[in-house]
């Protein structure tokens, strides 16, 4: 690299990575207001905040979100999390170096000694819980141990056959050694539900009074194609209600169903209350029931949908054609103009729900009406994963273009069990905070209050001491105060106060200090008043 290139490289300006962005003041005030409103509204419904890690084992998401989904198959930020294995690596290197020298029984001795050291160190750290091995790595380790034992029991003879066998086993060991990977694959979370369920299981929350109502907020990560309202690091406000199924619940099936419907409606009521409190206008709630995964319900419907789709296959685009085989329900998501008329002719799931799911859906609608929550039914609102069931909902807001969904949610009984927990029912939603903020800004509700309450214009040593005291008192009383670090002429100070959007200027000069008076100027009107300083 030439000197000039190196210099250029040194001065390189860094930029936020594509799809990520800085949230700056004053906009962050709006973010804080939205989050504060969520804390307040959710608390009134009895929800507690859960703060989750931003990364988890990749396996958690592939199990919960589904290995075939776009999110897991191509959008997650995953990496190999290596533990501190320097000591193990040193021993492994010695074994690697000795490997190619093994020709004789004597050379084999020292190779085996270091190999056994390596294996026992790995096992000790595994037993101490300091090392986590993936299931592949565990089977690689056991293959290594088997070959090690085979080599150990090789006869002492130096005949050509035994020597060949010795060399072969040594090579096998070297290959197995290279394959052995320590650590585990982890991913930045693409959503929060999986983590909430993992935490529910990990902390035995089934022992808490049921249902358990939790909410979480924070950044999520998906490697999507960035556009307006779609980022690679985006923020969600997420709420989940989990309830472990009582052993005798089956006896009261109808009651349970009715209770679930009430819970679903209350979750939605809370969500709409939040949107209302935050000032979102024109939010539309769409609901649907996607039944449950059984032959007399969703599976039967999907079979009918599939055969209806086969008949119109030629008229569909490539994506939808592919989905007929991979996930027919997702065809209903299509936004392609040319497919809309065809989709309108497809069978509706509502006509194929089993009696329980029908009763549940009717009860949810009744409960929403009871709560004065307005909704629209949308039979095309679906979820691609098997464990999603019954209630699904989405909220759209105006002003967002094609990415107009500000929240998605649904019931997912069975997810906790899928993650190794007890049979547990669940429902939740995720609000896209970035889009909510955009929608608020579009509708003029997002005006963040900028500026300070008071700008202190001071001149002179004595005035400065008084200014410091005044700033302290005003800040203690909750006012936002700008106290300039250097003396300024009053004209300049007032100009600065204006630029900062201050409402008042407190003028402190030597006159004011000696007369023990404060001059307060209301910057919007220019009005000025003197009062006695305390
Ligand atoms: P999902 O977890 O996919 O059901 O998404 C829930 C909500 O999160 C959506 O309705 C969006 O508002 C928001 N969201 C999802 N993906 C993104 C993204 N890449 N950028 C911004 N918001 C997103």
Image: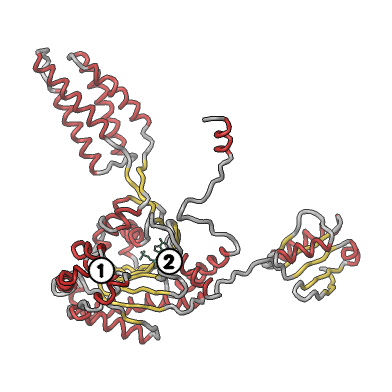
Q: Residues within 10 Å of mark 1 (few under 14, many from 20)?
A: many
Residue closest to the eye, 48 or 507: 507
Q: Viewed as shown, does residue 487 lie left or right of 151?
A: right
| Ligand 1 under 8 Å from disc 2 Cβ | yes
Which numbered circle lies on residue 516?
A: none
Pinpoint residue 57: horizontal percent, then vertical percent: 33, 50
- The kind of secondary structure element at disc 2 is strand
Residue beneath the point at 20% across and 31% down: 144
User: Looking at the image, is 530 positioned above or below residue 162?
Assistant: below
How is the rendered protein coloured?
A: secondary structure
Q: Nearer the viewer, residue 2 or 252?
A: 2
Residue 203: image x %, image y %? 34, 58
Q: Secondary structure at mark 1?
A: helix
Q: Earlier in the sequence, mark 2 or mark 1?
A: 1
- State the residue position of label 1: 331
Q: Quadrant of the C terminus?
A: bottom right
Vertical relation: 231 (above or below) 442: above
Name the residue beneath numbered marker 2. Answer: 432
What is the count of numbered marks?
A: 2
Location of residue 341 (image quadrant): bottom left
Pinpoint residue 254: horizontal percent, then vertical percent.
21, 80
Q: Name the residue located 18 percent from the left edge and 78 percent from the top edge.
A: 352
Q: Quadrant of ligand 1?
A: bottom left
> Which of the 4 image quarters holds residue 332?
bottom left
In the image, taking residue 165 as reference, residue 502 lies left or right, namely: right
Q: Residues within 10 Å of mark 2 (few under 14, many from 20)?
A: many
Q: Position of residue 160 (x, y in %)?
A: 10, 14
């Amino acid at each position: 690299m030439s000197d000039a290139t190196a210099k250029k490289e040194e001065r390189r300006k860094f930029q936020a990575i594509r799809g990520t962005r800085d949230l700056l003041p004053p906009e962050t005030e709006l973010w804080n207001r939205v989050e504060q409103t969520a804390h307040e509204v959710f608390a009134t419904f009895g929800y507690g905040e859960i703060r989750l890690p931003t990364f988890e084992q990749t396996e958690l998401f592939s199990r919960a979100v589904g290995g075939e989904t776009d999110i897991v198959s191509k959008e997650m930020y995953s990496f190999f999390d290596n533990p501190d294995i320097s000591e193990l690596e040193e021993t492994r290197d010695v074994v690697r170096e000795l490997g190619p020298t093994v020709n004789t029984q004597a050379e084999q001795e020292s190779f085996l000694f270091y190999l056994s050291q390596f294996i026992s160190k790995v096992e000790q750290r595994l037993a101490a819980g300091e090392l986590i091995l993936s299931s592949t790595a565990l089977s690689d380790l056991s293959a290594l141990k088997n070959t090690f034992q085979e080599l150990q029991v090789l006869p002492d003879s130096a005949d050509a056959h035994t020597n060949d066998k010795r060399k072969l086993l040594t090579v096998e060991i070297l290959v197995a050694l290279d394959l052995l990977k320590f650590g585990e694959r982890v991913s930045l979370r693409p959503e929060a539900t999986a983590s909430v369920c993992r935490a529910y299981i990990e902390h035995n929350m089934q022992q808490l009074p049921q249902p358990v109502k939790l909410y979480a907020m924070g950044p999520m990560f998906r490697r999507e194609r960035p556009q307006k309202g779609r980022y690679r690091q985006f923020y969600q406000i997420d709420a989940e209600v989990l309830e472990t199924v009582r052993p005798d619940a089956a006896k009261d099936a109808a009651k349970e169903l009715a209770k679930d419907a009430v819970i679903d409606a209350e979750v939605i009521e809370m969500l709409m209350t939040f949107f209302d409190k935050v000032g979102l206008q024109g939010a539309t709630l769409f609901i649907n029931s996607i039944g449950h995964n059984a032959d007399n319900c969703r599976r039967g419907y999907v079979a009918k949908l599939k055969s209806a789709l086969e008949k119109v296959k030629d008229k569909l685009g490539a994506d939808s054609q592919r989905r007929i085989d991979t996930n027919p329900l997702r065809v209903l998501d299509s936004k392609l103009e040319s497919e809309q008329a065809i989709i309108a002719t497809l069978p509706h799931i509502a006509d194929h729900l089993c009696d329980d799911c029908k009763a549940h859906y009717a009860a949810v609608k009744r409960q929403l009406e009871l709560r004065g929550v307005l909704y629209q039914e949308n039979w095309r609102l679906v979820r691609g994963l098997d464990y999603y069931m019954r209630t699904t909902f989405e909220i759209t807001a105006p002003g967002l273009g094609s990415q107009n969904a500000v929240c998605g949610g649904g019931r997912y009984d069975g997810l906790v069990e899928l993650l190794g927990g007890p049979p547990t029912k669940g429902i939740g939603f995720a609000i896209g905070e970035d889009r909510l903020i955009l929608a608020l800004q579009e509708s003029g509700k997002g005006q963040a209050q900028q500026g300070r309450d008071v700008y202190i214009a001071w001149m002179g040593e004595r005035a400065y001491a008084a200014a410091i005291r005044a700033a302290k008192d005003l800040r203690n009383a909750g006012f936002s105060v700008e106290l300039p670090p250097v003396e300024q002429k009053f004209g300049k100070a007032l100009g600065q106060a204006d630029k900062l959007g201050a409402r008042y200027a407190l003028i402190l000069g030597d006159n004011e200090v000696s007369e023990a008076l404060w001059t307060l100027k209301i910057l919007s009107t220019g009005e000025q008043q003197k009062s006695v300083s305390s």
